Amino acid sequence: MKFSFDVITSDDRTAARNGRLITPHGEVLTPTFMPVGTQGTVKTLSPRDLQEIGAGIILGNTYHLYLRPGPEIVRTAGGLHEFISWDRPILTDSGGYQVFSLADLNRIAEEGVTFQSHLDGSYEIFTPEGTMEIQHDLGADIIMCFDECTPYPSTHQAARTSMERTVRWARRCQQRHRQFQESDGHAQALFGIIQGSTYADLRQECADTLVDMDFPGYALGGLSVGEPKTAMFEMIDAAVPRLPEQKPRYLMGVGFPQDIIAAVARGVDMFDCVLPTRNARNGSVFTSEGPLVVKNAVYARDFGPLDPECDCYTCRNFSRAYLRHLFQAGELLAPRLATLHSLAFYMRLMGEIRRSIAEGRFTSWSRTFLERYRLGQESEQTTANIFPGGER
Amino acid sequence: MKFSFDVITSDDRTAARNGRLITPHGEVLTPTFMPVGTQGTVKTLSPRDLQEIGAGIILGNTYHLYLRPGPEIVRTAGGLHEFISWDRPILTDSGGYQVFSLADLNRIAEEGVTFQSHLDGSYEIFTPEGTMEIQHDLGADIIMCFDECTPYPSTHQAARTSMERTVRWARRCQQRHRQFQESDGHAQALFGIIQGSTYADLRQECADTLVDMDFPGYALGGLSVGEPKTAMFEMIDAAVPRLPEQKPRYLMGVGFPQDIIAAVARGVDMFDCVLPTRNARNGSVFTSEGPLVVKNAVYARDFGPLDPECDCYTCRNFSRAYLRHLFQAGELLAPRLATLHSLAFYMRLMGEIRRSIAEGRFTSWSRTFLERYRLGQESEQTTANIFPGGER
């Protein structure tokens, strides 16, 4: 099955839409949230845990998997799906973000990025062509262009230089990818990544150029990197309306439930973020009444579930008091049960978003959800502009 | 349902037997291995993982649960079963071993043991009556007398003094326990613990005295604490034959597969040990061909399962190469998948032991198993005397 995407329902009042991604490893309904499996595992969870909570597509990181265990081992295993025993869709990023954020040292040139491994200090180089080869070895259903993740803040000139290089790299990625496509029967879909820092004109220009190149999907990169939330939504508003209706839009690295809802209202289809998994490991879980730091002493005698609305394995069987005890005792079951719940929360959130769009009540559902979730307790910046342009 | 035990089949050639423990939380077939759930969780595993691999009864530690979260919280939760969401039998130890092995400081007196918590340095006292009260709060199906775990080596005189105190404490435990039994309908069974260090006469004397006191089950304590394996088996040989046929015998803290088989041959019914779980967390798993250190580099490209004989979730879905990668990457899924496998190995081992006894081929099964398992690779001491007295 080749990659395709179609829009099923469009919301009347916002740019929200329901879609369907079709990949060689099955269908995914959008809007979707992709749990992050950086090193070939969504931390603490097994594939059947993920299936149980309804995860449709997960993410793997090219940077990490390249350094360890290495693409050759994954390829020999039969690809990432086989290696990690996950038979549903996978998306791999290109490592563009990680060579800047994780590598000990990096030097950028037209050819690519030279960096030092954060694991052993070895010198490595990522080129557009090289990351296509690695991602071909990994064998994900959706792969990403190697981009330059422009740091925030950047001057307009620096952001332009960086964006233009990202575009040139996208051409090289596309060219190398096409060679693989001929041999592997178009098994992988390559998405373009829109950069341009916090400058609407650069985002528009980048979007227009990539659209001309005709990628099967488009991502917004270089956001959620420290800029104000208002700037992030302005960039979404600048780029998304220029993207083809019938292609999926992916907002990389986002985010909080309220940010996801606001981005869905702007026409975004795909999300990934380490928030639910990372916070859960630290003892903070998402619930329908907002985040809850279950390791806090106040829950020592709270025998209710993490979230009374939730029907995940954790909530069906264990109390806040037990979770709190496990965290206090440093037990490995603690991050596991908390992660399972928080991802189940995100999966349910996305399911409710999709259902509300299908039933023409996305706006009212959002308001009710956010009211309950006590909008703004983590981030007040989103309060003002959940719905772009006063809803369309 | 009150506690009871009956022997179903006795082996013709050894003292091995199949039995059935009946407890308020269901039946357990013996010989059985009890996974250790020190802090109210078998590390890394969920209750449904344990059920899936066929765990019948698990162990909880009084010392740890007393210190954290405290018996009052567990009681308020409805007892340990409810707190940890495990509806099958539980056995709690008395903390006798831990106050000596874990507490920062301990002082023994006739009244009990004063010790400093290894968590916060607080001064605590465990008395025979007190540990009955804690274990009553925890609500396990089988509870243990508070004993003095005689250190190895000890002089005969020191071992006698210690053993005699253990006997006096056992009387106090029994007395306190009887008061609870009147109120709770005999929900908990109290086992006596035989001490006596490595002196056969003391072990025999202790066994005889405890048998006179008529406990529903008997444990051998103070073994596997550094003494030679030969001494351990001599103590089993000294004590077990003096115990009533129709009561269960529990060898505390044992052990390796070959030791379990040798103890079963001597009439032991119950075992617990941290070996499969602790070693798994460190990257070493049990397999039908002996232990395997899966984190070793030699497995980096080994795409076979941990144990080709095993049908656990880990072996059905993941390769040694993937497990090795997870350990290398420090992923929490690594200890989880390894623990699941090693406990599944122990559960299958016990199932094979029971089946071989039932079918009158325990001796031949043992020889075949041990040959395959490459007897002696961890501990050569057991080689000579797997079968006591040349089989009876």
Image: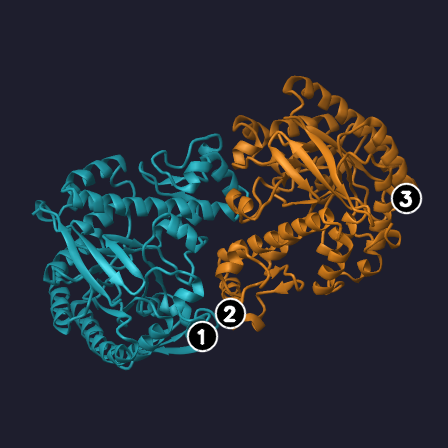
Chain colours: A cyan, B orange
Q: Amino acid at mark 3?
A: Ala
| Residue at the image position 63 percent from the left and 64 percent from the top | B292
Q: Decide if residue B155 is in sight here.
A: yes
Q: Which residue is mark 1?
A: A76
**Please, what secondary structure does the residue beneath circle 2 have?**
loop
Q: Assess whether mark 3 and mark 2 are in contact (beta carbons under 8 angstroms).
A: no
Q: Which residue is mark 3?
A: B200
Residue A229 x %, y %: 22, 52
Residue A178 x %, y %: 24, 78
Q: Amino acid at mark 2?
A: Phe
Q: Chain of mark 3?
A: B
Residue A291 x %, y %: 34, 41
Q: Which residue is mark 2?
A: B303
Q: Chain of mark 2?
A: B
Eyeballing the image, is A200 above or below B22?
below
Q: CA distance from mark 2 to mark 1?
A: 9 Å
- Tell me the quarter of the picture where residue A198 sits: bottom left
